[in-house]
Amino acid sequence: MAVTLDQTIAQKQHSFFSRLFSTQTFWVVIAVILACIFLSFATDAFATSKNLYNITRNITFVAIVALGMTFVIITGGIDLSVGSVLCLSSMVLAVTMHAGYSIEIGILASIATALAIGAFNGILTAYLGFPPFVVTLGMLSIARSLAMVASNNTVVFQFGPDHDKLLALGGGAWLFGIANPVLYMILLALITGFILRWTKFGRHIFAIGGNEHAATLTGVPVKQIKVAVYMISALSAGIAGIIQTGWLGAVTTNLGTGMELQVIAATVIGGANLAGGVGTAFGAIVGAALIEVIRNSLGLLGINAFWQGTFIGGAILLAVLFDRIRNFRRSD
Amino acid sequence: MAVLELTNISKHFGAIQAVNDVSLSIEPGQVVGLMGDNGAGKSTLVKMIAGNFHASHGTMRMDGKELILNKPAEARQHGIEIVHQDLALCNNLTAAANVYLGRELRRGIGPFRILDYAAMYKRAGQLFAELKSETRPRDLVKQMSGGQRQAVAIARTMLSQAKIVLMDEPTAAISVRQVAEVLNLIRHLRDQGIAVVLISHRMPDVFDVADRVIVMRRGRKVADKAIASSSPEEVTGLITGAIEQVS
């Protein structure tokens, strides 16, 4: 029987499973699950509700920022300033509330600060053509220094009249005993996933990462979208900063130091490509989860904490290695 | 009536006269080969039609009405579509996503509108079927052949009611078999009453598919005649300047 043109066009080349197996994210999920099964048998402490509560909550701060970072990385950019922005937003919140303002005003000031920094990063990158690496490297230094200026480099641990509200926001567990930060993370991941898959904005982000020139020629507002993604990245750092403040109950100026590298590692392990055009919300979460499980397990297995960096670095290389092997096969 | 009519169009950049006093008209459903050596003014002329440049002198008319274009988006609104030389495709997106890039279909109410994947796959599939191209809307452009990529870029021009399609060197960098495929795509556009301007260096392609050939040299139009009454030798002579001008 001859195959007609219409049949050829209507044919789906990949089944659901072949597509699933070809994603890096899927294999990282398998790795996380296997690690958890192994740890449940190898140690008594892993599968306790207290430890799981800790792990899930520890994932959230890196994961929330990684969600924002995913937008930037899909466009082919990078944001190195997130750790410092997290610290600055946190400090703005702390200082504002310490001065006697309500939690609403504190959060508003904190979010506004983050958005302003994101807009600054984005405008320099999109309109003035600065390389994002340089702009955000500069901001990494500036934002942390501003946090020191704002607090005079002291530890803030009294948050004025709404002190208890802030601690409940970050440290409570309002639903089924799940830590609040985990709830925020799930909500933000759902929003991110929705934006990336179902909106025109999300589609355009992928287009910019795939071929920026083509996006410009077809009328995609490339510059505005670039500014928006850096604002989203800074916003996610700001939100993580607010939650972390509530959870820790104190802010120091070294909060979030070196976090940008963990966040980028999480997105890359989860399948995002630093060259742009590829990335998912789920991947960012899974990447953050793998890092946290590695960290947690080393502690429980009694391995010296100095080995942490080696294992996490190895996970990054291994995750990307799978991707390379697939690409070699395809190009042959 | 001519779909596009240019009258005494000139363009200069400072002291350089890129296009000098060119008049031409293009009928619906006509394929016009635009030929000339590098620097002859072909791409400047095309960029004026595409809304990238303002003409220094002269007027453009579309369906008898004067046409003033300030930017490429306005050209598109008037039914002028361009297939860029590099095709302007995103390898990480599906064929359908590329066809609809910049004008995605959405469904929903008010501000709550989501991408309408089903409608975009369906319409893109119809367009590929019209073009007789074996291109699957759900496939990533990354995995496609040169001919399929051309089909995606050309399908893009058929989304709206295009009146005229400008194609910049569509056969420059693809295999012989794929060239035949692209020439067929051009014939399908023509059969739907769309005028095609084919900018090309390749003599055989122009003589294969075009109805008319326009030759430019040093910013001037030196020939504008039916393919049937010309020959590759004559056009080569016109391009190089061995033949001064024919009417």
Image (cartoon, coloured by chain):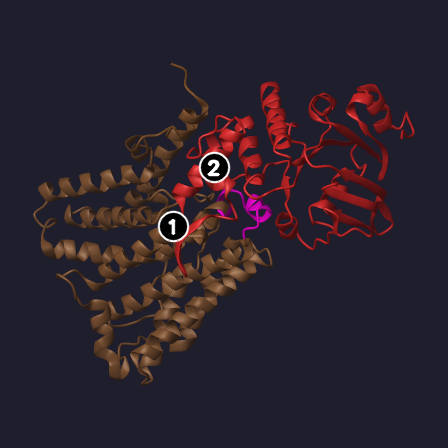
Q: Nearer the viewer, mark 1 or mark 2?
A: 2
Q: Is residue A294 above or below residue B40?
A: below
Tell me which corner region of the image, top left, top right, bottom left or bottom right, holds residue A231: bottom left
Q: Residue at left 14%, top 41%?
A: A37
Q: Quadrant of the C terminus of chain A?
A: top left
Query: Marks 1 and 2, how far apart in space?
Result: 18 Å
Q: Which residues are magenta?
A: A208-220
* Secondary element type, mark 1: helix
Q: Is residue A221 above or below residue A273?
A: below
Residue in view at x 37 percent, y 38 percent: A320
Position of A273 compared to A104: left or right? right
Residue B124: image tag: 2
Chain letter tied to red? B
Principal secondary structure, stretch drawn in magenta: helix
Q: Which element carries disc 2, helix, strand or loop? A: helix
Image position, residue A279 (x, y; %): 39, 45
Of all residues, the one furthest to the front in this rendering is B1
Going by the numbered disc 1, the residue's amino acid type is Trp
The residue that mark 1 highlights is: A198
Q: Where's residue A164, x and y in %?
A: 21, 77
The chain displayed brown equals A
